Image (tube, rainbow, N blue to C red):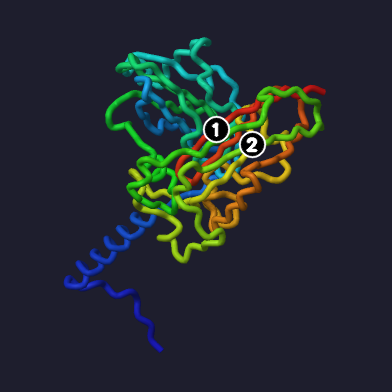
């Protein structure tokens, strides 16, 4: 049985082969360009300026959050060159290599403990009516990488409660126009707001929260998405935003201090946007929100395994708007 060597391509066949190779190359490049990686650790944190809105007294409220690119790694970043705010003239810190650490400006109420992934609308800073064209710059350095965000009163940063809801996928990504006047939950944490306890000693936290306008309406607690389109809303501002469940909820979390040394009973729902299924998060399908407790009173016990200064934060949300209160705890041996 005779064998034949490789056959040479005819002139008419060569263009077809070239087209096939180009198509294959294009497909491979397209797939590569659309690849999204899921990092558990090793990535940096990006501070986020969410926007501003005016207050009745002429001042302005600036909203901040952050994006931790990791799904598991958490950070404790004390105030200083790795975690600071600075008031500057426009563009003064555009050069990322420059620093402007002013001890009187460093602490503007930002966290020192950073959870995974997106933590939006986490805190506010109020600036006076004459803030003008200044910038309020937040610098965060993690894993040797410095990231910076520049807050200003530029018109394109102006927001309202509907923008807030859209950015967090509130009410399953709804764009209901009534969200523009949505009221945040009423929140009150039982005194004292400063505590002093010993390691291992349980501290009882009592918070009261109500939704003054009962909007957006609470939905079925067991709602399951039937498709990726139902899980993710493409109607968000500038990006695809994971959907979240509507309805009143309250969560305690560690705002300052090592969260790994703190335990809550009962376990608290995550305050960060964990969109993985069954992740104990309002953004996690099947969107199971705990029932509102009797008299709208949330009770939790917290214990600490290491001495130090901690700030615990209660966040009340209707899924679209947020209210916060802090409790400061000094833990001794």
Q: In what quadrant of the picture does the C terminus appear? A: top right
Q: Establish if 64 lies above or below 133.
A: below
Pick whichever, 83 or 165, lies toward us.
Answer: 165
Q: Residue at x 42, y 19 (%)?
A: 97
Measure the C-alpha gap from mark 2 to mark 1.
Answer: 11 Å
User: In the orientation shown, which residue stands out farthest toward the bottom?
Assistant: 1
Q: Which mark is residue 105?
A: none
In the drawing, does residue 91 fall left or right of residue 82? left
| Residue corresponding to mark 2 | 207
Q: Which mark is residue 324?
A: 1
SS at circle 1? strand
Point 45% across, 58% down: residue: 231
In terms of sequence position, does the residue under pointer 2 or pointer 1 come before the other? 2
Label 2: few (<14), some (14–19) or many (≥20) C-alpha neighbours in 10 Å? many
Q: Along the line of sight, which residue is nearer the eye, 232 or 59?
A: 59
The quadrant in which the N terminus is found is bottom left
- Where residue 210 appears, as percent x and y from the top left, is 55, 42
Q: Could you tell me how many numbered marks the image carries? A: 2
Mark 2: secondary structure: strand
Give the residue at the far left of this rendering.
12
The structure residue drawn at horizontal position 58% and vertical position 53%, both measured from the top left corner, is 289
Few, some or many C-alpha atoms within 10 Å of disc 1 (few <14, some 14-19, many ≥20)? many
User: In this orientation, which residue lies closer to the viewer: 35 or 63?
Assistant: 63
Q: Is residue 266 left or right of residue 55?
A: right
| Residue at 47%, 35% in the rendered image | 121
């Amino acid at each position: 049985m005779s064998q034949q060597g490789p056959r040479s391509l005819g002139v008419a066949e060569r263009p077809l082969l070239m087209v096939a190779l180009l198509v294959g190359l294009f497909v491979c490049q397209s797939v590569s360009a659309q690849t999204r990686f899921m990092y558990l650790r090793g990535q940096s944190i990006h501070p986020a300026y969410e926007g501003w809105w005016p207050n009745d007294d002429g001042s302005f409220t600036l909203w901040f959050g952050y994006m931790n690119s990791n799904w598991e790694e958490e950070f404790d970043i004390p105030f200083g060159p790795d975690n600071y705010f600075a008031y500057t003239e426009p563009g003064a810190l555009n050069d990322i290599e420059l620093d402007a650490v002013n001890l009187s400006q460093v602490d503007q109420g930002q966290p020192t403990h950073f959870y995974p992934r997106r933590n939006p609308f986490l805190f506010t800073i109020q600036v006076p009516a004459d803030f003008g064209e200044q910038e309020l710059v937040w610098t965060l350095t993690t894993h040797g990488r410095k990231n910076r965000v520049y807050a200003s009163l530029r018109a394109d940063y102006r927001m309202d409660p509907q923008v807030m809801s859209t950015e967090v996928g509130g009410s399953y990504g709804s764009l209901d126009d009534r969200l523009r006047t949505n009221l945040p939950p009423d929140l009150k944490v039982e005194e004292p707001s400063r505590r002093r306890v010993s390691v291992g000693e349980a501290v009882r936290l009592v918070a009261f929260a109500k939704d003054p306008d009962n909007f957006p309406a609470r939905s079925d607690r067991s709602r399951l998405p039937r498709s990726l389109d139902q899980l993710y809303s493409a109607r968000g501002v500038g990006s695809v935003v994971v959907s979240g469940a509507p309805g009143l909820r309250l969560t305690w979390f560690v705002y300052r201090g090592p969260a790994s040394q703190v335990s809550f009973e009962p376990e608290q729902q995550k305050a960060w946007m964990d969109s993985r299924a069954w992740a104990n998060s309002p953004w996690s399908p099947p969107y199971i929100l705990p029932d509102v407790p009797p008299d709208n009173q949330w009770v939790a016990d917290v214990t600490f395994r290491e001495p130090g200064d901690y700030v615990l934060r209660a966040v009340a949300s209707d899924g679209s708007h947020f209210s916060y209160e802090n409790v400061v705890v000094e833990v001794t041996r």
